[in-house]
């Protein structure tokens, strides 16, 4: 009677333990009362230690037991797995067998989970063999953990065999198997299982939506999302990521607003997704609203949200806000530093970008390949040739980063713009990887800038192989020949373009944000041919007001600019007329007119 009351008292103390100090006090009492050999109490004690992540203390207490039973071993194995010591869990199982203690279904479910954490296929398959040996192969919980184990290893066929052999399946088994097929890219099998699933949970719906999203099947993902009766934050975020992959960034923002309206609280992943969408849209106003939501709901400005905000503000043209967020961050990881360095470089603040990189080095943050792309780009913006060369060599020698094609592209661009075209060509020819169109294009642009037809011809020859359908490269070379009156070469290029079926590139465009909507203005080139004394006037194309009026009804606005083409004897008239036209019509001015006249705005607008 006394022993029963004592055990009950100690059990009460164990359940009340909230710290290691309290556990140590209870364990001291167990030693004094000689109850450390009681398997039931030790089972509870070890479970409490595991719950508080004091596995080492639990192991020490376990070592003083003379004859622990399977339940005590199970508690320790489960605790080691829960506290991320899966190798210790396997060690206790081996000790369990050596002491002739018979394992049970709870032993094996914990063991398989430990093998899953370790990603140890050899030990996992050995445990699977023991499951057969001891007759626990038909236990639902054991089989479910095996399904998860093989799925995690990517062995979908073994996972499916275990699943098909199950006499009884819970919702976790169904969801795990569906997720395995989704991760394997087998949406047909995943869909069949999903249709057969007796009770679909939110996790299974989310898995199917995510699977379709990763394969680019946005319509299928959208259909499933709309069919869901109940959605959690993961459901909404998964669908947002799907739209983001499909570059439907306005739908990401719309879904975010719908989510808020339905009372779903977003998490950090959701916020990073919607901030990234604002960055791609270039919508500063919507980005400000999202930031205000973050502040009002007291989100922690962690490295993930912080780096997304820095990138968003930089891409929306507000580098000052990027810097403000950067300096507000208490902890900054590599992504934060990369985002601010890239933002400064993109906005032309090359010296500031280089100083930021130096500060990053002082903080002992190891740069990566992305960091150096931004640094080399910054050097290109201001023509720091020697600085760029030093940074490029430092990347290779000091940080052991192998140059990628983007790094070579930046260096070729830097050298070409500085007029060092022979050095740039030599770098291209000495590249350790095959140069792509970005590299040759950078060289070609440098040739255009410094009027070097010989190297330009070499660049275009390579670009014709890499991008035979890109008219931009042909047009650039054509204009270079036209500038030096080599009309025979111009004719040859035009003939070659016609023979190859190369069409003129799509018109240029600019974007403007008005009333929280991003509008795209497309620049169309209207060709008029003058023969003899025939003339055309602006009125023949219609007024600019009539053209701009459509801005009120749609996103796309067309602005025609007259491109004149005459024969050689009328070239002086052409130059005079074109000078008058382009001096009057500036694309940026048209954007401002669009904003202030046709939308009746009284606030600033952003265009880029």
Image (cartoon, grey):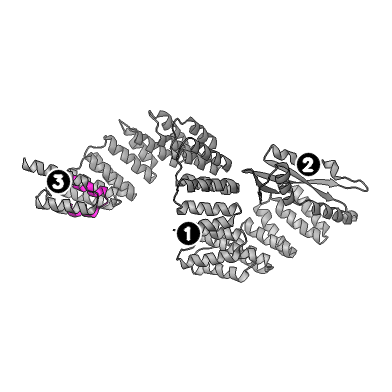
The residue at 34%/43% (across/down) is 149
Mark 1 vs 2, N-terminal side: 1
Q: Nearer the viewer, residue 380 or 197?
A: 380
Mark 1 vs mark 3: give the one in front: 3
Q: Is residue 213 above or below residue 119?
A: above
Q: Nearer the viewer, residue 482 or 289?
A: 289
Residue designated by label 3: 10
Residue designated by label 1: 334
Residue designated by label 2: 545
Tell me, yes or no, whether the two marked residues, 2 and 3, touch with CB atoms within 8 Å: no
Under tag 1, what secondary structure? helix
Instruction: Estimate the spatial distance between the alpha carbons at disc 1 and disc 3, rounded to whole Å.
Output: 50 Å
The verdict on residue 59 being magenta is: yes
Magenta segment's dominant SS is helix
Q: Is residue 372 visible?
A: yes
The verdict on residue 535 being magenta is: no
How far across and how far down the image is residue 298, in percent? 45, 48
Count the labels in the image: 3
Q: Nearer the viewer, residue 218 or 301?
A: 301
Left or right, residue 328 beside residue 160: right
Under tag 2, what secondary structure? helix
The residue at 57%/43% (across/down) is 249
What range of the chain is rendered magenta? 44-61
């Amino acid at each position: 009677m006394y022993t029963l009351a004592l055990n009950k008292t100690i059990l009460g103390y164990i359940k009340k333990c909230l710290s290691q100090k309290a556990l140590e006090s209870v364990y001291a009492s167990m030693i004094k009362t000689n109850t450390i050999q009681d398997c039931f109490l030790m089972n509870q004690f070890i479970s409490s230690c595991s719950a508080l992540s004091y596995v080492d203390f639990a192991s020490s207490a376990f070592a003083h037991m003379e004859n622990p039973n399977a339940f005590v071993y199970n508690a320790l194995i489960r605790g080691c797995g829960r506290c991320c010591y899966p190798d210790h869990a396997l060690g206790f199982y081996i000790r369990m067998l050596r002491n002739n203690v018979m394992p049970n279904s709870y032993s094996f479910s914990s063991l398989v989970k430990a093998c899953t954490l370790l990603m140890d296929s050899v030990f996992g398959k050995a445990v699977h063999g023991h499951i057969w040996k001891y007759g626990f192969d038909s236990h639902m919980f054991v089989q479910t953990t095996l399904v998860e184990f093989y799925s995690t290893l990517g062995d979908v066929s073994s996972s499916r065999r275990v699943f098909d052999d199950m006499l009884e399946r819970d919702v976790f088994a169904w969801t795990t198997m569906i997720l395995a097929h989704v991760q394997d890219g087998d949406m047909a099998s995943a869909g069949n299982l999903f249709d057969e699933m007796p009770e679909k949970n939110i996790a299974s719906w989310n898995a199917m939506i995510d699977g379709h999203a990763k394969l680019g099947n946005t319509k299928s993902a959208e259909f499933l999302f709309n069919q869901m009766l109940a959605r959690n934050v993961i459901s909404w975020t998964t669908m947002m990521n799907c739209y983001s992959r499909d570059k439907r960034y306005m739908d990401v923002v719309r879904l975010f607003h719908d989510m808020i309206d339905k009372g779903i609280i977003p998490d950090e992943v959701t916020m990073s997704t919607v901030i990234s969408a604002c960055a791609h849209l270039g919508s500063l106003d919507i980005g400000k609203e999202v930031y205000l939501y973050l502040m009002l709901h007291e989100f922690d400005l962690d490295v993930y949200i912080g780096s997304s905000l820095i990138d968003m503000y930089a891409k929306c043209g507000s580098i000052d806000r990027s810097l403000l967020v950067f300096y507000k961050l208490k902890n900054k990881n590599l992504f934060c530093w990369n985002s601010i360095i890239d933002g400064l470089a993109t906005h032309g603040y090359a010296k500031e970008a280089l100083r930021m990189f130096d500060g990053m080095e002082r903080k002992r943050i190891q740069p990566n390949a992305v960091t150096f792309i931004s640094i080399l780009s910054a050097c290109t913006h201001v023509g720091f040739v020697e600085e760029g060369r030093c940074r490029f060599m430092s990347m290779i020698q000091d940080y052991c980063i192998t140059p990628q094609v983007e790094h070579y592209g930046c260096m070729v661009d830097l050298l070409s713009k500085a007029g060092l075209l022979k050095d740039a060509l030599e770098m291209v020819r000495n590249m350790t990887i095959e140069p792509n169109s970005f590299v040759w294009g950078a060289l070609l642009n440098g040739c255009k800038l410094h009027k070097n037809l010989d190297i330009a011809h070499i660049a275009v020859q390579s670009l014709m192989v890499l991008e035979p359908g890109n008219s931009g490269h042909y047009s650039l070379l054509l204009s270079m020949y036209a500038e030096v009156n080599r009309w025979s070469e111009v004719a040859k290029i035009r003939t070659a373009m016609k023979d190859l079926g190369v069409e003129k590139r799509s018109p240029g465009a600019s974007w403007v944000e008005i009333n929280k909507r991003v509008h795209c203005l497309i620049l169309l080139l209207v060709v008029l041919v003058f023969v003899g004394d025939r003339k055309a006037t602006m009125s023949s194309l219609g007024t600019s007001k009539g053209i701009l009026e459509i801005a009120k009804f749609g996103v796309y606005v067309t602005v025609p600019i007259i491109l004149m083409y005459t024969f050689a004897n009328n070239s002086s008239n052409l130059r005079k007329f074109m000078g008058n036209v382009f001096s009057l019509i500036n694309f940026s001015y048209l954007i401002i007119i669009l904003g202030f006249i046709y939308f009746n705005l009284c606030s600033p607008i952003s265009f880029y």
